[in-house]
Amino acid sequence: MRVRTDDEVYRVDAVWLGPPKATFPWRARYVAWGVGIVVFLVVTAVQRQVGFGFDFINTGWGFVITIALTRFICTRISHERPLSAVVAMWVRELNSPREKTSGRGGAASAARIRVNRQRPRRRTRRDRAAERRDRAARSQHRRQADRRKKEDRGVRTPA
């Protein structure tokens, strides 16, 4: 059972009943008439593209399809959710990013591997000793900086 809205403003303004004393036997909102005309034009264009002729039977089936599609579309439309919001939602849904289902990667390639003209040389003892001294100096400097930070905070540390 379908309950009609109690709001008289929307019921009166949104429905065209037809000419006086010759009303239609159905209730159709203004939006439904607009949507129906556009849907009918699209349905007849599709029928022509598929190859159906413009005769009585095909036009009748076009009307039936138009009525079904219009009713389906208009069940999604109300005064709280207008046609523009439904169309915008549909466009956003079509343009939203999708999860990639195809695998990434592929065959391995050597195109991104850097190649030097000379082979890397083995480090000598002197190079390793210099590197060790540099590392020790950096860690000592870091310890002194940490000690200064603690002193700034009022924490005493042994010297």
Image (cartoon, rainbow, N blue to C red):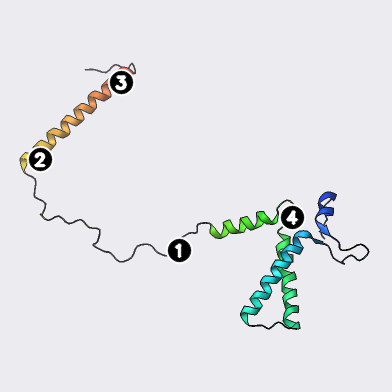
Q: Give the label on residue 128, or none.
A: 2
- Residue 133 location, x and y as percent? 12, 33
Q: Earlier in the sequence, mark 1 or mark 3?
A: 1
Label 2 amino acid?
Arg
Q: Quick check: 75 above or below 139?
A: below
Within-10-Å neighbours for mark 1: few <14, some 14–19, many 20+: few
Disc 3 is placed on an element classified as helix
- Residue 57 location, x and y as percent? 75, 83
Q: CA distance from mark 2 to mark 3?
A: 33 Å
Label 3 amino acid?
Lys
Q: Say which residue label 1 marks.
A: 101
Query: Which residue occupies 25% across, 58% down?
Result: 112
Q: Earlier in the sequence, mark 1 or mark 2?
A: 1
Q: Earlier in the sequence, mark 2 or mark 3?
A: 2
Q: Nearer the viewer, residue 72 or 139?
A: 72
Q: Are marks 3 and 4 in contact (CB under 8 Å)?
A: no
Disc 1 is placed on an element classified as loop
